Image (tube, rainbow, N blue to C red):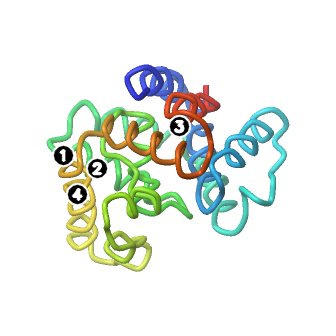
């Protein structure tokens, strides 16, 4: 699943700014939206630019605009960080969390999709692992950079303690496929390929 699908997504999503923005749009669509609906809404957005209200609303619209306007610079920064940083996981989450509407979980999801790192502690994974939502709230109101980095580091460390990005992905796909009736873990994993 992760081993088959994530490398395809990473290769496509880091190819250029347009592809990078597509992955950002998909992740925004997954926030507070059933996964199959987010996949469907992403397909429509990629094909026609149409925004389905179920998937794209509120701060997500600001996030789309930000991703569109800043995709090239974000991609360049991410590529540099992935190659040179002593803490690439922390730095990648920091970059992605700046997108309006993206909190720690979805910033981790972007790092997972595009770089095979970190992971997504969304509501499904929080339930699976018995974690509390308030531990990983958005950092929009955190002003001090040191506090921000500490919270990101805590998130990254928690993901690492729970397993690799691959383990989190594969476990999430199996859990969501079973509990939400979306099909097999392989089918759920393959749905991520909508971004390609």
Image x and y of residue 91, in percent: 28, 49
Image x and y of residue 1, in percent: 44, 26
Say if mark 2 contacts mark 3, CB within 8 Å. Answer: no
Q: Secondary structure at mark 4?
A: helix
Q: Earlier in the sequence, mark 4 or mark 2?
A: 2
Residue pictured at 33% horizontal, 34% vertical:
166
Q: Earlier in the sequence, mark 2 or mark 3?
A: 3
Numbered tag placed on residue 158 in the rendering:
4
Residue pictured at 42% horizontal, 71% vertical:
138
Q: Report the number of numbered marks.
A: 4
Q: Which residue is mark 3?
A: 72
The CA span between labels 1 and 2 is 6 Å
Point out the frontmost of discs 3 and 4: 4
Q: Which residue is mark 2?
A: 91
User: Does 161 sit above or below residue 57?
Assistant: above
Residue pictured at 43% horizontal, 45% vertical:
172
Numbered tag placed on residue 87 in the rendering:
1
149 vs 15, left or right, is left
The CA span between labels 4 and 2 is 16 Å
Image x and y of residue 35, in percent: 62, 48
Residue pictured at 81% horizontal, 42% vertical:
49
Point out the frontmost of discs 1 and 3: 1
Q: Secondary structure at mark 2?
A: helix
Point out the frontmost of discs 2 and 3: 2
Estimate how packed mark 1 is, as few (under 14), some (14 to 19) or many (20 or more) residues with alpha carbons within 10 Å: few
Q: Earlier in the sequence, mark 1 or mark 4?
A: 1
Q: Earlier in the sequence, mark 1 or mark 3?
A: 3
């Amino acid at each position: 699943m992760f081993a088959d699908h994530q490398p395809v997504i990473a290769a496509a999503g880091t190819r250029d700014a347009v592809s990078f923005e597509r992955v950002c749009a998909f992740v925004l669509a997954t926030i507070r939206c059933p996964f199959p609906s987010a996949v469907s809404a992403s397909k429509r957005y990629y094909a026609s630019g149409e925004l389905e209200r179920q998937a794209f609303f509120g701060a997500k619209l600001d996030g789309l605009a930000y991703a569109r306007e800043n995709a090239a610079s974000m991609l360049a920064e991410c590529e540099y960080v992935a190659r040179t940083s002593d803490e690439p996981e922390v730095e990648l989450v920091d970059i992605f969390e700046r997108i309006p509407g993206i909190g720690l979980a979805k910033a981790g999801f972007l790092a997972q999709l595009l770089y095979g790192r970190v992971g997504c502690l969304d509501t499904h994974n929080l339930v699976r692992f018995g974690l509390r939502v308030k531990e990983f709230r958005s950092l929009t109101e955190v002003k001090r950079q040191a506090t921000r980095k500490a919270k990101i580091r805590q998130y990254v460390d928690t993901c690492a303690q729970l397993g690799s990005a691959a383990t989190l992905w594969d476990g999430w796909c199996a859990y969501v496929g079973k509990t939400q009736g979306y099909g097999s873990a392989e089918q759920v994993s393959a749905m991520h390929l909508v971004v390609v």
